[in-house]
Amino acid sequence: MQNGGKGSMHQKAKVKYDFEEDILVARPLARNYDSSFQLGNFIFDLDKNKNINGMELLNASKLFGIHKIVLKNMVSGNLEVVVSKELIQVQIQIKSKIRNT
């Protein structure tokens, strides 16, 4: 997980997917939670310094345009969040195990 702004922060994160609710959650292993805010389908967690240190993506499979099973079978991924005065940019890469039927 990365959080950019004045600088960048690289952290190992735990990523999990709630199949029933279709929510992708990414949170650093060492986390200091203070508050959250929501923008559309994104919920961003903040630490006491107002740096983003976690994220939830609601309706994840619909936003990615993929089947929920792809997210359920996720084996690794990368999340980058870049914050500036004008925008919050989120880049998500997912590696999933898919079987042919």
Image (tube, rainbow, N blue to C red):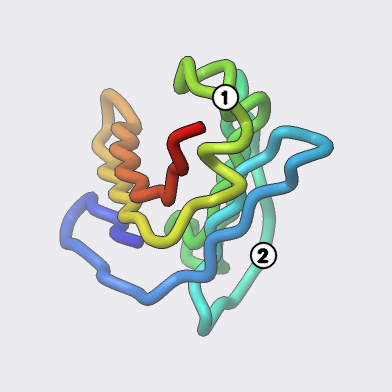
Name the disc covering residue 67, or none: 1
Mark 2 is on which residue type?
Asp
- How far across and how far down the image is residue 96, in percent? 41, 48
Position of 47 relative to 3 (above/below): below
Q: Determine whether the residue tagged by mark 2 lies in a helix, strand or loop.
A: loop
Position of 70 relative to 77 (above/below): above
Residue placed under numbered mark 2 in the picture:
34
Residue at 44% across / 43% down in the picture? 98
Q: Quadrant of residue 87?
A: top left
Q: Is residue 79 left or right of residue 5?
A: right
- The quadrant of the rendering that contains the N terminus is bottom left
Name the disc covering residue 45, or none: none
- How far across and how far down the image is residue 12, in percent? 38, 76
Position of 37 relative to 7 (above/below): above
Q: Are marks 1 and 2 in contact (CB under 8 Å)?
A: no
Q: Is residue 92 left or right of residue 26?
A: left
* Residue in the foreground of this view, choosing between 34 and 60: 60
Tell me the distance, in whole angstroms, between the alpha carbons under discs 1 and 2: 33 Å
N-terminal-most mark, 1 or 2: 2
Residue at 57% across / 31% down in the picture? 42
Residue at 45% across / 70% down in the picture? 13
Tell us which disc is closer to us: 1 or 2. Answer: 1
* Residue in the foreground of this view, choosing between 98 and 92: 98
Q: How many marks overall?
A: 2
Among all residues in the image, which is located at the extreme front? 101
Q: Determine whether the residue tagged by mark 1 lies in a helix, strand or loop.
A: loop
- How far across and how far down the image is residue 18, in percent? 73, 47
Mark 1 is on which residue type?
His
Q: Is residue 1 left or right of residue 5?
A: right
Assess disc 1: are there few (<14), some (14-19) or many (≥20) residues with their C-alpha within 10 Å of its C-alpha.
few
- How far across and how far down the image is residue 8, in percent? 19, 62
